[in-house]
Amino acid sequence: MSRSLVEERLSGHNRWHPDVPPILTVAPGDVVDLDVRDGMDQQVNTETKSEDIPAVDGRRGHPMTGPIFVEGAEVGDLLEVETVEIEPDSYAWSSILPGFCYLPEEFPDPYLVHWTIRDNIATTPSLPGIAIEGRPFLGTMGVAPSLEHLREYDARERALAERSDGIVPLPTPEQAVPNDEPLASEGLRTVPPRENGGNMDVKQMTAGSRAFFPVDVPGALLSVSDTHFAQGDGESGGSAIEVASRVRLRLGLRKAESLSWRPRYPFVEFDEPAQRLARPHVLTTGISITPGGENQYLDITSAAKEALREMVAYLIGERGLEHDQAAIILAVAVDLRASSVVNNPNALVSAVLPLDIFSDES
C-alpha cells in the first residue's frame, strides 16, 4: 500500500465501532488476501530520524484492514481465523517513544532503528552484529464490539482515566477513520486489547495458528493490522519490528449451539516450531521490589521491571550495547515469563534472551 489510511480512507478504519461498514463479504471457509499497513499508518519510513518520533501521531494507530463481514456469523458464535501466510515488506522499523515502554523512566529519549528484511532475517546498521530471525504475526486482530459493549468498555476506561496517573487512550475524533459522526467520537481507540481482541500482540498468532473470537455483532466484522516481523513476549520496549505486509487468512465459524465453552476473551490454537538443540539463552530475574527497595506483595509488574533492568545491564555490560540499543533488544527479542507467582511475598519474573541473535554466538 503506497497511501496511508488517513489519506486513502477506503480500505479500513482505526476505531472500533459496530457501524463501520464492511469492505468485504465472505463465506465460512473462504480464504482472503489482505494488504496490511504498519501499526503507525506509514508515518515512519527510511527518511525518518529519531528526533522525528515524538511527532508520530498515535491517534492514527492502528490502521486496520476491514471490517470483513462473514456470512452466517451470529451473536454467540465463535469466529475462527487461521493465519495461512504473512509476507512482510523488506523495510521495517522499531522505536523508543518516550513514555511508551515498560521502563519509561529508564528510556526518556526517542530512538529509531531502520531494519532491512532479507531471507527472513532482519538486520540494521544501528545494531551491528545482530540478526533477528522472523516469525511474523498480526499484532492486531479482532471483531467489532456491540454498541452495548462499546459503551461498557468506554465507561470503565473513562473511570480508570479519572483515578489513574497512567495514559488511557480515550475516544477522540481527531484522525479518526471513518470520520463520520457519531462513529468518530464514539469509536474506541485501538491501543488496548479488549474482549473483542484488538491490539493483543500475541506472537504465537503466526502462520498456522488459529485464533477464535466471540462474535458480538451479526457478520462478526473482522479487522486486522499491525504486522510484527519479530517481537519478544511483552514487547517491553514499546514497539516490535514493525512492518507492512500481505496476509492470507482462512475464515471459519463455530456455531453457538455446537459450543461446550464460549470464552469471554479470544483464544489461540498454535504449534510451537521445532527448536534447534541447545539453542543458547541467557535469563535474568527480578522480584517484586521497587528500585528503592520497597517490597510489593507478589507484584508481577515490579518483578518484570526488575528482570528487564537486569537484562539491560547485561546487554550493556556483557554485550557492549548502548543504553537505547538495549531497549530495542528488549522489545524485539526478550521474552518475559512469570516464573513464580505463589512464593510469598515475592513474585519472580524472568527475562529470556536467545544468544544466537549475536554473530559471535551463531
Image (cartoon, rainbow, N blue to C red):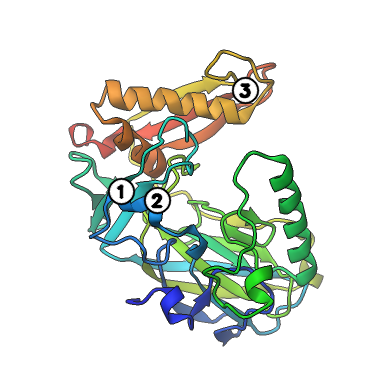
Query: Is residue 144 something that shows in the picture?
Result: no
Could you tell me how far apart the alpha carbons at marks 1 and 2 are, in whole angstroms? 7 Å
Label 1 Cα neighbours within 10 Å, binned few <14 / some 14-19 / many ≥20: few
- Tell me: residue 64, above or below residue 243: below
Is 89 on the left-hand or right-hand side of 350? Answer: left
Position of residue 286 measured from the top left corner of the image (x, y, whole percent) = 51, 21
- How many residues crowd around disc 3 within 10 Å: few (fewer than 14), some, or many (20 or more)? many
Q: Is residue 238 above or below residue 298?
A: below
Amino acid at pointer 1: Glu
Residue tagged by mark 2?
54
Is 218 displayed left or right of 140 in the figure? Answer: right
Corner quadrant of residue 348: top right
* Residue occupied by mark 1: 51
Residue identified by numbered label 3 = 347
Q: Nearer the viewer, mark 3 or mark 2?
A: 2
Query: Label 3, label 2: how many angstroms apart (C-alpha)?
Result: 34 Å
Q: Give me the residue at 43% from left, 81% from top.
A: 8
- Inter-mark Cα distance, 1 to 3: 37 Å
Q: Is residue 323 left or right of residue 162?
A: left
At mark 2, the secondary structure is helix
Residue type, numbered disc 3: Ala
Instruction: Name the N-terminal-most of marks 1 and 3.
Output: 1
Tell me whether the residue at label 1 lies in contact with that at label 2, contact meaning CB atoms closer than 8 angstroms: yes
Q: Nearer the viewer, residue 175 or 129?
A: 175
Front position in the image: 191 or 91: 191
Which one is closest to the eye, mark 1 or mark 3?
A: 1
The three-letter amino acid code for the residue at tag 2 is: Pro
Residue at the spot 22% in from the left edge and 49% down from the top edge:
123
Give yes or no for contact between labels 1 and 3 (Cβ–Cβ under 8 Å).
no
Characterize the local packing of mark 2: few (<14), some (14-19) or many (20 or more) Cα atoms within 10 angstroms: some
Q: Quadrant of the N terminus?
A: bottom left
Answer whether labels 3 and 2 touch (C-beta < 8 Å): no
